[in-house]
Image (cartoon, helix red, strand yellow):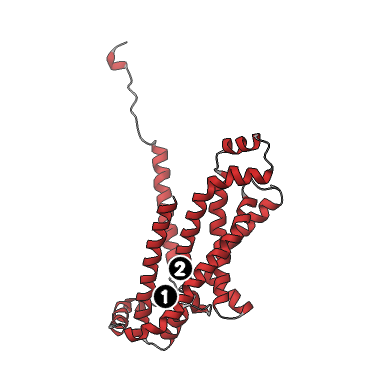
């Protein structure tokens, strides 16, 4: 066979059909984006959008300088916010731990009944934002920090429960089998075979959730759930921009400190 008659295969990343399908797919995404953009902005008043930079500069000018003499009035609301986050996290963790063990495949006593119920609780908690929980609880039990603490707790169940039950399912089965081989009962297997493996993850998840709850609890006062958000709402309603700037700076400082504490604790634990 002559060399000229030999056919050399040419490698291509995609065939012509695949390339066309890719281009049509991108075209469809662009068309979908344009349609969604038009749908969402059909009632937008672009005059106000174009005027937004000037309005933002005007409000920023009114917020400076901050009214630092207002700071002492914020210490108690700030302490309430920290308590809302801390106690709410503890309550959420206490409810999330049994929920996680019921949701994990390797620890649930009833895969057909209790596991779906536990998963439903986790999904429900994660689906509803803390602000919505607070709105509901303020209507049910009245305004105050109790509504905020319960809202944070209910919101934390889904976060802690999901990550914890995934950690339980990822435990080393050989260690569990070794404990079971000694003749240990179900409770002893959990206590000595599974719990020691998930403790680092448990503490890391709990501290991380507390850090998140510090941020979320700062705005619960906007709906009457107590804390520093209540002061922020009052300052916004009275257009006291000097006070607003102090509150925002205090919230920023609190979040930075909580982030630092959370990082140090996770580093020490994990």
- Which residue, as the protein is rendered here, is positioned at the far top? 1
Circle 1 SS class: loop
Q: Residue at x 38, y 83 (%)?
A: 72
Q: Residue at x 32, y 17 (%)?
A: 6
Q: Which image quadrant for residue 237?
A: bottom left
Depicted 46 relative to depicted 129: above or below: below
Nearer to me, 121 or 4: 121
Q: Residue at x 62, y 38 (%)?
A: 179
Q: Is residue 259 visible?
A: yes
Nearer to me, 146 or 180: 180
User: Does residue 186 appear to the left or right of 245 in the view shown?
Assistant: right
Q: Which residue is mark 1?
A: 44
Q: Residue 98: percent from the left, percent from the top?
A: 63, 55
Depicted 133 relative to depicted 185: above or below: below
Nearer mark to the viewer, of 1 and 2: 2
Q: Are marks 1 and 2 in contact (CB under 8 Å)?
A: no
Q: Residue 31: percent from the left, percent from the top?
A: 42, 57
Nearer to me, 16 or 104: 104
Q: Which image quadrant for residue 12?
A: top left
- Which residue, as the protein is rendered here, is positioned at the far bottom? 238
Q: Residue 258: percent from the left, percent from the top?
A: 41, 65
Q: Is residue 128 visible?
A: no
Q: Residue at x 35, y 80 (%)?
A: 246
Q: Residue 57: percent from the left, percent from the top?
A: 28, 80
Circle 2 SS class: helix
Q: Which residue is mark 2?
A: 214
- Mark 2 or mark 1, which is nearer the start of the sequence? 1
């Amino acid at each position: 066979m002559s060399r000229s008659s030999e056919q050399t295969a040419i490698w291509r990343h995609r065939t012509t059909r695949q390339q066309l399908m890719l281009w049509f797919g991108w075209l469809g995404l662009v068309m979908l984006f344009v349609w969604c953009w038009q749908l969402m902005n059909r009632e937008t008043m672009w005059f106000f959008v174009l005027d937004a930079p000037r309005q933002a500069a005007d409000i920023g000018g009114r917020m400076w300088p901050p009214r630092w003499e207002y700071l002492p009035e914020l210490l108690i609301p700030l302490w309430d916010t920290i308590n809302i986050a801390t106690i709410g996290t503890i309550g959420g963790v206490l409810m999330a731990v049994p929920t996680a063990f019921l949701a994990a495949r390797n620890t649930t006593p009833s895969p057909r009944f209790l596991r779906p119920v536990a998963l439903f609780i986790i999904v429900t908690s994660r689906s509803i934002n803390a602000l919505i929980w607070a709105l509901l609880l303020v209507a049910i039990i009245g305004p105050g920090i109790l509504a905020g603490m319960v809202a944070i707790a209910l919101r934390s169940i889904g976060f802690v429960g999901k990550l914890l039950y995934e950690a339980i399912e990822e435990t080393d089965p050989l260690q569990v089998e070794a404990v079971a081989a000694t003749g240990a009962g179900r409770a002893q297997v959990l206590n000595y075979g599974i719990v020691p493996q998930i403790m680092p993850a448990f503490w890391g998840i709990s501290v991380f959730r507390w850090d998140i709850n510090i941020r979320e609890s700062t705005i619960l006062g906007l709906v009457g759930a107590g804390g520093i958000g209540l002061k922020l709402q009052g300052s916004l309603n009275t257009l006291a921009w000097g006070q607003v700037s102090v509150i925002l700076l205090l919230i920023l400082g609190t979040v930075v400190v909580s982030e630092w504490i959370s990082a140090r604790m996770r580093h020490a634990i994990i």
